[in-house]
Amino acid sequence: MSQHQDQKLDGQPDASRRKFLNTAAFAGLAGAGLSVGLSACKQEQAPAPAQNAPAAAPTAAAGAHKIEVPPGELDTYYSFSSGGHSGDVRIYGLPSGRQLKSIPVFNVDCMSGWGITNESKAIVGTRPDGRLKYITGDTHHVHPSYTDGTYDGKYIFVNDKIHSRLARIRLDTMECDKITDLPNVQGFHGTFPDKRDPVDAAVNHTTRVFCGAEFSIPLPNDGHGLDDTAAYRSLFTCVDAETMQVRWQVLIDGNCDLVATSYDGKLAATNQYNVEMGIHYPEMMAGEWDACLFFNVARIEEAVKAGKVTHIGSSKVPVVDGRKEANADPKTALTCYVPIPKNPHGVNTSPDGKYYACSGKLSPTASLISHEQVLKWFDGELKEAREAVVAEPEIGLGPLHTGFDNKGNAYTTLFLDSQIVKWNLDAAIKSFQGDKTAVPVVDRLDVHYQPGHGFTSMGETKEADGQYFISDNKFSKDRFLPVGPLHPETAQMIDISGDKMVLLADHSVTSEPHDSIVIRRDIIKTRQIYDMNDFPNAVKDPKESGLTREGNKVTIKLTSQAPAYSLPEFRVKKGDEVTIILTNHDKVEDLTHGFAIPKHDINFAVSPQETKSVTFKVDQPGVYWCYCTHFCHALHLEMRSRMIVEA
């Protein structure tokens, strides 16, 4: 350990907690694992090993930014955050930290009716009996579409790790419009869109989305070869950004964590752990190195076009061979495995497009990989792929994820040290080349506690602005009012505009966000009301309201306009399959209506000029009051319709 390991921060509480964490962490690497130390800790932590130990954390009073957004004023940025195993995507305003919306994606939402309405079920996917295919989801990584190297405000893509699905959210309505199942994949974790076409220079926007699979499985996973663990493999997948159809897949060694893409469109990358292809923990830790795996997109698509593919099971998706042994010749290789210290976690592209930062996790280093050097490897100009690494500074314990500012600095979360470390890319390169005067680490800041993902404002674009860093911390412990055994987590906002980082605010977030991105508000252009013509089943005139019957299938068409539905009542019979189509005829911004039916598990919202529908069976005679669940008018309570079910 560093000489700084046992020092005590000036102005900080008892340092034994940090010391305990670091000691337990190293013990875990040797045997039982990291979780032992984390679950037991109760006291404050001691500082990390570092070139520069931090002073007492500067507070918001010393910050250059105001953090309060006065009443009636708007935030400067949107922050889009994955919800984790809640299955949703959250929207926050920054710098206020106010949550503005939760976008249901892989979860069921009884407010909006997501997973209840016919329209949302068609997107999520259903079983033959009409039930949702899945009612669970695990969102980890959210990334927007690009034009000319920056966010274009069109889409955000998000993964579902549990069921290996990719979802697309329209940013004009902030609603999910497509979900795609990835074939022959489990543990779909990292995802990232491309930033331009790798071949056609005229196409300077997102056309592909890349998806990394974390879990290796038998291929196909159909019950054969269950115990032939040496044959287990993972796939890297490319999805068309517009059609959301799977374009191709690559058979690979190792397990994918995150994904990054180059600004010229030529490369996609994923940091790999378990290149040993182990099944159990000891086997996964056997080797000294893992990898950052690069994909030559143009070559892969040439191979697909030439028919140099296989197919797995019943899937029609073309699969090329990206395993290391099949790509030994750089000049024809589809993939490049750059050796990285053990169990890297996270790979992020610098705003100038020159570098990929790949954090060590179990190594106290961050590896800086040159984009130009990787391309040279593919051209046969490097002897070894490892030569693409141009810096590897020691930055602290448990480095995970990296963001960038506009001044050539990187900011990496240190999970075990509970810190953010600021390091300079040029100094790191000089130090790696042997310059003893170069000091890569320029600042450290304690966060609370155990940061996972971290991200800067506009930091994954060429327009990184160097204003804020958000540290998504996995443990909040004593930072908020107690709310029971399940704690909120902290998203701590840090001012990075000056030489020293300044902690500005603790924002509470419900469990469990994994990743976020921060977008300037001028990029996002939302619709405030819908266009009724966008809905093929819209009830455009209240006069169209009524009931039609075909056998035991009944369709009810009605409209809503505060404070009334167009049908005060309607009659159906026990055993009928009922479809209700509701169009909101109000044109006033923010005048949303709801529609709920007691005892029938129906509840959904319709925004101005929007149409939604639901289908359900009625199996109990009686009177059921359909009512508006979303406050809309002074006579909101009187906004009802009567469903009469005859025996």
Image (cartoon, rainbow, N blue to C red):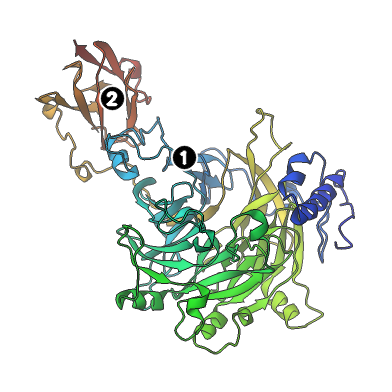
Which mark is drawn over residue 562? Answer: 2
Please state which of residues 365 and 587 is positioned toward the viewer in this rendering.
365
Which mark is drawn over residue 475? Answer: none
Tags 1 and 2 touching, CB below 8 Å: no
Q: Say what amino acid the circle numbered 2 marks.
A: Ala
Q: Is residue 198 visible?
A: no
Residue drawn at x 38%, y 65% is 208
Q: Is residue 179 left or right of residue 535?
A: right
Q: Quadrant of the C terminus?
A: top left
- Marks 1/2: CA distance? 24 Å
* Mark 1 element type: strand
Please state which of residues 221 and 486 is positioned toward the viewer in this rendering.
221
Query: Dot 1: within a 10 Å radius of its alpha carbon, few (fewer than 14), some, or many (20 or more) residues?
Result: few
> Residue 635's spot in the image, x, y percent?
33, 17
Q: Quadrant of the N terminus?
A: bottom right
Residue drawn at x 77%, y 40% is 40
> Residue 358's spot in the image, x, y percent?
62, 67
* Mark 2 element type: loop
Q: Which residue is mark 1?
A: 101
